[in-house]
Amino acid sequence: MSERPPGCAVDVTDAAERVRAQLGSRINAPFRLLADHLPIGVFLTDGSQRVLYANRVLSELAGHEPDDAPLELDAALVHPDDLDRVVAVARRVIERGESRLVDCRLVDGEGSARAVRCRLAPVPDEAGRVVGLVGTVADHTDVERQLEHRATHDDLTNLPNRALLAAHLDAALARAALTRATVAVLFVGLNRIGVVIDALGHAAGDRLVRQAARRLVATVGPDALVSRFAEDRFVVVAEDLPGAEAAADLARAVVASMGDAFVIEGDDVFLGGIVGIAMAESGDGTVDQLVSDAGVALAHAADDGVPIAVFDAEMRAEVEARHTLERSLRRGLERGEFLLAYQPIVELAEGQLLGFEALARWVDPPAAGMGPAQFIPAAEDAGLIGALGQELLAQACEQLAHWQRVRSDVFVSVNLSARQLAEPDLAQRVAATLADAGADPAGLHLEITETVLLDDVERAVESLHQLKLVGVRLCLDDFGTGYSSLTYLCRLPVDVVKIDRSFVAGLGVSDRDSSVVAAIIGMAGTLGHDLVAEGVETTAQAGRLRALGCDMAQGYLFSRPVDAAAAAAMLDA
């Protein structure tokens, strides 16, 4: 075997050509026929990543004509920003003999780029060495456009979503800062959509939302952006408005359009709409602030029962105060700041102490003099009434158990909120709380008002029957102030009726109030209910109630609410 002289260069051209010839031999007529009819690009390269074959689809993607020079996986074909990554993946395939995916962009002859996904696989020779690559190329340009559209638009209505709304509003504020113009944000809410869904189903609700979206776009015109913000909420961004009145006119047009009938499954459906307006002059404000302000105005419109509300500083102050109160409520619950005061309930005939009404008190409220009339509704709005009610119920049951060891016939009345009554496991939790405290259920009176029955009377009646099975007594509080008092009195399994203080205050003063009290006492007596008159403050009122046949009373005439120690002293007296 002859030796090569030192430093003599090895010419590998012939070897490379032999490899290319071997690879080229694999590109026979059947292969070409199949590859040219595939909907994706197909190519074959040698080990230097020179393209030996490209099918029709890949040639079209690359803007390559058959008579052009051979394709190469370089910056003329692959986008320069992607080239290093593609080359690295190709080398890995050759070195490891494993298939790989790589996303990149192909550049055509005019410089336009298309997003593609390539799968590269190794091509071995007879000895198993990787001598080339075979690849497929799938055009993802349209897919990426669809993904981009879906990322910025709502699937149901095809309207811009929150992300695109934020970008558009941010740009609108920037333009307004330059032109000193006004930008208005309208937060639009649909009424009664839940009723339609309950009656016709979610598919009908979706069709209704799509109809409302199209109608809203038509109403505000092409110069305003309409975004779907939530299930039945839309946000409109209007630029270059001359002032607040123009925004109000646009809002009135929106409300009017939402008031017309929608057609669902051949039937007319009526919704109606409400609008909250927030405005930014000369680009003042931020995206989040404007949308939030418009949402606050929408909530005020709903609370006030009006179709349109314009945001002002007082609304923001109310929201912040409500938020602060909610945080304080949560901290107060964690720290055990809610306790009970007890107002005596006495027998009118002899003045004997019979029991107490338990009244919630906040030991350290955020504002001086804040009573249950303020913090109980706030707890309901914040979703804390369940936790607060359970805490107070537990305290009342523990105190009841302690007092029952002194007087077995004493009772404690505890108020139930509408949300508590709606909880499906209320009866079980009351029973468990009584058992944990060791209290006799007969000594626990649970008070409800007629207003807690308005949302779902049937469910409320069922819940009350379950409570009766626990062994507690039920009281109908503030009787006479509702719209259907007699109906409720006949249907509900109540034991005690409490006459509202507003009627008691009118005894001997208003013939109407005196007649109402007499009628309540007569009805309750006929149905076998006990009676408690609330708010008794004078001996004249007490005497009149005794004469009419009322059993029990509570009020400042007998005692103000006192703490547990003072209540215990009254029992011992």
Image (spheres, grey):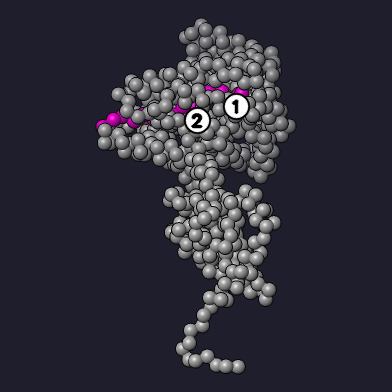
Spot occupied by residue 472 in the image (x, y as percentages of width and height): 68, 32
Can see residue 565? no
At label 2, the amino acid type is: Arg
Examine the rendered structure and indicate whether residue 266 appears above or below residue 279. above
Determine which quarter of the picture holds residue 220.
top left
Which circle marks residue 381 in the picture?
A: none
Q: Please tell me which residue is depicted at 67% across the width and 60% down the height of the picture.
A: 28
As drawn, which residue projects farthest toward the right? 469
**Furthest residue in direction front, as rendered:** 67
**Percent coordinates x, y for residue 495 in the rendering:** 67, 23
Query: Label 2: which residue?
Result: 233
Q: Which residues are magenta?
A: 180-197
Q: Secondary structure at mark 2?
A: strand
Q: Which mark is residue 207?
A: 1
Q: Residue at x 50, y 65 (%)?
A: 87
Q: Residue at x 32, y 32 (%)?
A: 280
Q: Is residue 191 magenta?
A: yes
How many angstroms separate mark 1 from mark 2 (CA)?
A: 15 Å
Q: Is residue 193 above or below residue 385?
A: above
Res 102 seen here: yes
* Apparent side of residue 311 relative to residue 396 in the rendered image (left or right): left
Which quadrant would the N terminus be assigned to in this image? bottom right
Q: Position of residue 419 (x, y in %)?
A: 59, 32
Please state which of residues 519 and 484 is positioned toward the viewer in this rendering. 484
Report the number of numbered marks. 2
Residue 176 is a magenta residue:
no
Pick the front one: 543 or 343:
343
Q: Which quadrant holds the C terminus? A: top right
Q: Nearer the viewer, mark 1 or mark 2?
A: 1
